[in-house]
Image (cartoon, rainbow, N blue to C red):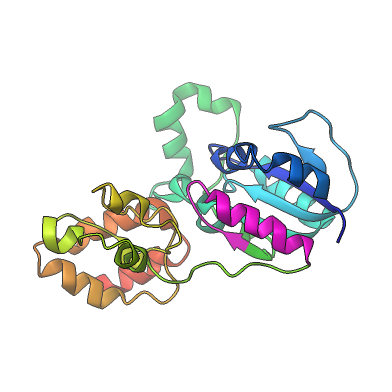
Amino acid sequence: MDQLTVGIFGLTGCAGDQLTLLNCEDELLAIAGKVRMKSFKMASTTEVGGEIEVAFVEGSVCQPRDLALLREVRGRAHNLVALGTCACFGGVAAMDQRLDPEILKEKVYGTEGDLFAIQRARPLSTYVDVDFMLPGCPVEKEQLLETISCLLKGSFPEIPTTPVCADCRIRENVCLVIEKEQVCCGALTRGGCKARCPSLDVPCLGCRGPVEDAYYRAEMEFLAARGVTREVVRKEMLLFSTPAGMGERLEKEFD
């Protein structure tokens, strides 16, 4: 494919994943030669309507206007890529699924919250078909470039399915749970980040979302043997991964 028509769209989120693309400074000219950008509000006010071959959508659905935009984009795009952990799993915006959204809005915005409508935060897949998920908070630059390269060839890339613990092994990091008695969620979290946080002695908080075949009970028992309660693990893991099954899977382990 000589040139790909692309749109970059943002729902409720921090826009960090869109910024990752703009930070590909050494590659931007090459990308510009292969991509016809039809919508990218962070970079340009120019909007071109009609069909697009690939839509990258960042953020989670937290407002009615998010949902309206998402459905419009899905209707225009041949392929829809969920860009970042919020789009894939709900992310931080979806961390508290127990309280009523209106109560959360009042706590954060007070009376100013009356000016806009919200709804319970959800990932894109709750409402539309998603063709590919690229997790990360933000996404890894190399994986974003690989995704664009593969799309130009009409395919999707293979992204890591192993946990962060595998990345730690490759980098020969010491285990923060065993050696330093810290609460690290690397065994339950998708790898591909080169274990950036544990390499700096910072425990994994699960920002890349849940690994697909995590063995929750074994991890719970492993941490419990080191004095870490299930409630602490639950609190850490639900920060980024609710509600993509993580909440239900963890609750099941608590039963």
230, 99: nearer the viewer = 230
In the image, is residue 2 above or below residue 188?
A: above
Spot occupied by residue 12 in the image (x, y as percentages of width and height)? 58, 40
In the image, is residue 102 above or below residue 195?
A: above
Quick check: 24 left or right of 249? right
Q: Is residue 139 magenta?
A: yes
Q: Is residue 186 magenta?
A: no
Q: Residue at x 20, y 64 (%)?
A: 230
In the image, is residue 56 above or below residue 168?
A: above
Rendering quarter of residue 208 = bottom left
Quick check: 156 left or right of 89? right
235, 18: nearer the viewer = 18
Residue extending farthest right:
50
Spot occupied by residue 15 in the image (x, y as percentages of width and height)? 58, 37
Q: Residue at x 47, y 71 (%)?
A: 161
Quadrant position of the C terminus in the picture:
bottom left
Spot occupied by residue 129 in the image (x, y as percentages of width and height)? 69, 65
Q: Give the magenta range.
A: 133-153
Viewer can see residue 126 = no
Residue extending farthest top:
112
Q: Residue at x 17, y 54 (%)?
A: 182
Quick check: 14 left or right of 103? right
